[in-house]
Image: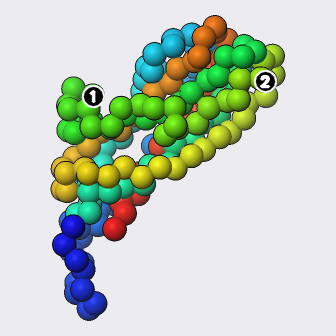
Amino acid sequence: MPEIKTGEIVETEWWPESVTVTEDTDISEISSTSFIPGSPVCATTFVAPRSGRVGVAVSAEMREESLGNRLFVSYEIYQGTSAAGTLVRSARSGFGVSTNGDAGGTSQFMTLGNMSMVENLIEGATHYIRTVHSVEGGALNDIGLRRLTVIPLA
């Protein structure tokens, strides 16, 4: 990344807008042990800043009804405007949020959130980001809300 010097005017294209997307449709009885996007998809596009680095905040309202079977919500990033583009960050449980696996039978939603940094994006390129979710095993885990925020970093 080129150094920004004191007094230098920062161009708008160096520092694109932050974006946030929220989807509050309930997804019930999740049983997939592979990451899937859900329906409707919680997704948006963003432009990578000059640094090629962004902060990604992912949060979700989650209810674990199946004892011992954690629920994961994470994200995927593709270069381009849809999931048809090149995958540049695959979903991992460590980059999202999860229930703890011992709250089976609870009727309460928990709101959980996490933030991570993504590096080595192509500056100025449009990227597509979406939430994905999975369970460790079993079924009956639910999502009440999914939210993504992408923040350009220097």
**Where 134 sits versus 92, above or below?**
above
Q: Circle 2 sits in a helix, a strand or a loop, which is it?
A: loop
Q: Which of 115 and 25 is in front in this view?
A: 115
Q: Circle 1 sits in a helix, a strand or a loop, which is it?
A: loop
The residue that disc 2 covers is 103
**Where 118 sits versus 138, above or below?**
below
Kindly report which numbered mark, 1 or 2, lies closer to the viewer in this rendering.
2
The span from disc 1 to disc 2 (Cα, nearest Å) is: 33 Å
- The quadrant in which the N terminus is found is bottom left
Q: Which of marks 1 and 2 is nearer the N terminus?
A: 1
Which amino acid lies under the numbered mark 2 shown in the image of this protein?
Ala
Crowd rating for badge 2 (residues with CA inside 10 Å; few <14, some 14–19, many 20+): some
The residue that disc 1 covers is 83
Within the image, what quadrant is residue 132 found in?
top left
- Residue at screen point 49% across, 40% down: 95
- Residue at screen point 29% across, 66% down: 15
- Residue at screen point 67% across, 16% down: 69
Crowd rating for badge 1 (residues with CA inside 10 Å; few <14, some 14–19, many 20+): some
Q: Where is residue 148 in the image (x, y as percent from the top left)?
A: 47, 43
Q: Where is residue 79 in the image (x, y as percent from the top left)?
A: 22, 39
The disc label shown at residue 97, or none: none
**Where 153 sits versus 32, above or below?**
below
Within the image, what quadrant is residue 109 found in?
top right
Within the image, what quadrant is residue 113 found in?
top right
Which amino acid lies under the numbered mark 1 shown in the image of this protein?
Ala
Q: Nearer the viewer, residue 83 or 5?
A: 5
Left or right of residue 135, residue 89 in this image: left
Q: Let me know if residue 149 appears in the view.
A: no
Q: Let me know if residue 98 appears in the view.
A: yes
